[in-house]
Amino acid sequence: MVGRSKHNDRGHTQREYAVIGLGGFGGSLARRLEAMGHMVLGVDGNVARVQDIADEITSAVALDATIEDALQEVDIASFDTVVVALGHAFEASALVTSYLKEVGIRRVICTAETRRHQKILLRIGADQVIVPDVDSGLRLAETLAAPNFMERVLFDTDHSVIELKTPHSLAGQPAAAMERYGARVLLIYRQGQLLPAPSAETELREGDTLLAVGDREKLLELASLP
């Protein structure tokens, strides 16, 4: 097993993720999660891939993920979310997914090359199965790292409109509080009612669904608030 770690001392919203398979999708996912301030364990049987990403994520190890003892060595059971990015190797994906659910991983997300494989992995116990590309790896990273994030529409490379739940830390504050994140609230959906074009003084409430526009990166930061 080959590995390398780097210290990661980030903010209080930091989370830990394990990514098994560091190809195009898995590699982009791992790098993006790390760049967003989270701790990432990357696992791959290819030593070159591990060495290539080692300086960019918290920890990277080279091992055969289909060997249960090897996964135990990296304490895989301590992770709440594990992404199995082995879509090109269906049998390996199935074995790893089955083991991860067996040891109690709450959220296992897999990749698959075909819809048939997707259905089988879901039956095995995967919580989510996607048919990926590099861009979808970036989108998954942003969704995982922003718990309030629901949907996004890109305007250009810098700006977007997103749908999100009111972060707990902003509940009870006026809509103007969103301006700290370069965002403007366009609409509030509250208990079956639409509140279009709310004023800056409109109170944000727990459970509200917000439609906001602003800088793409700052909106993701907003959606990541506790």
Image (cartoon, grey):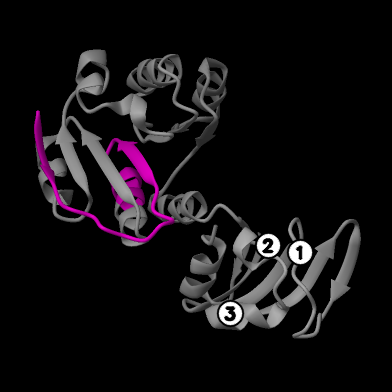
Give the percent coordinates (x, y) of residue 73.
Answer: 19, 22
Q: Mark 2 to mark 1: distance in Å? A: 7 Å
Local crowd at mark 2 within 10 Å, few (<14), some, or many (≥20)? Answer: many
Mark positioned earlier in the residue sequence (2 or 1): 2
- The residue where tag 1 is placed is 205
Q: Nearer the viewer, mark 2 or mark 1?
A: 1
As shown in the figure, which amino acid type bears the numbered disc 2? Thr
Circles 2 and 1: CB atoms closer than 8 Å: yes
Magenta-span inclusion, residue 191: no
Q: Quadrant of residue 97?
A: top left
Q: Residues within 10 Å of mark 3 (few under 14, many from 20)?
A: many
Most foreground residue, 167 or 83: 167
Query: Can residue 92 be seen in this snapshot?
Result: yes
- Which corner quadrant holds the N terminus? top left
Secondary structure of the residue carrying numbered label 1? loop
The residue identified by callout 3 is 214
Residue 57 or 11: which is nearer the viewer? 11
Q: Residue at x 54, y 33 (%)?
A: 128
Left or right? Give the position of 196 relative to 161.
Answer: right
- Specify the label residue 166 is tagged with: 2
Indicate whether residue 11 is drawn in magenta.
yes
- Compared with 138, 215 (above or below) is below
Q: Earlier in the sequence, mark 1 or mark 3?
A: 1
Name the one closer to the observer, 156 or 76.
Answer: 76
